[in-house]
Image (tube, rainbow, N blue to C red):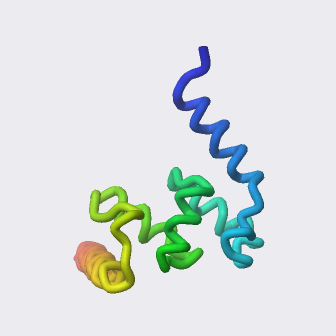
Amino acid sequence: MPSTVNIKLQDLICQSEVNWQNINSEFADQELVNQWLSKGFGFKQVKDWIDAGLTVNDANFVYWLKKNNLIEEKTLNKDYIKKLRNKYQEQLNETLEYRIEQHSK
């Protein structure tokens, strides 16, 4: 019996063969597709995120949202996305400032 990991990997491989350009023409860049797949997002999930107003370059942002249990696709709206994007950027800035501070010691 195949393991859950193998099934998930096979699912992601199959999804990488779907025409991602049907979501957005920028997905002609396979690296953008790989960024989403490497974070565990499949074609349908990415389509839902993009349809909700996120961009093809938001894989890291969406991963952060999911990792922190901050949002589900069904609760997205532009104002809430903007608020969460600001929170994400603040956290990135704090992390960067901390790393710079630690490096200069």
Closer to the camera in the image, 74 or 93: 74
Q: Is 28 displayed left or right of 77 in the figure?
A: right
Task: Specify the farthest residue to the top.
Answer: 1
State which quarter of the image contains the C terminus: bottom left
Res 73 seen here = yes
Toward which corner of the image does residue 71 lie, by quadrant?
Answer: bottom left
Q: Is 99 displayed left or right of 12 in the figure?
A: left
State which quarter of the image contains the N terminus: top right
Toward which corner of the image does residue 96 lie, by quadrant?
Answer: bottom left
Instruction: Residue at 59% x, 63% y: name it.
Output: 35
Q: Is residue 19 above or below residue 54?
A: above
Closer to the camera in the image, 75 or 12: 75
Closer to the camera in the image, 48 or 26: 48
Closer to the camera in the image, 38 or 11: 11
Task: Specify the farthest residue to the front.
Answer: 74
Res 104 seen here = no
Give the percent coordinates (x, y) of residue 72: 36, 61
Instruction: Residue at 43% x, 66% y: name it.
Output: 62
Give the percent coordinates (x, y) of residue 29: 74, 72
Give the percent coordinates (x, y) of residue 74: 39, 64
Instruction: Residue at 62% x, 38% y: name it.
Output: 9
Toward which corner of the image does residue 80 lie, by quadrant?
Answer: bottom left
Q: Is residue 12 above or below residue 85?
A: above
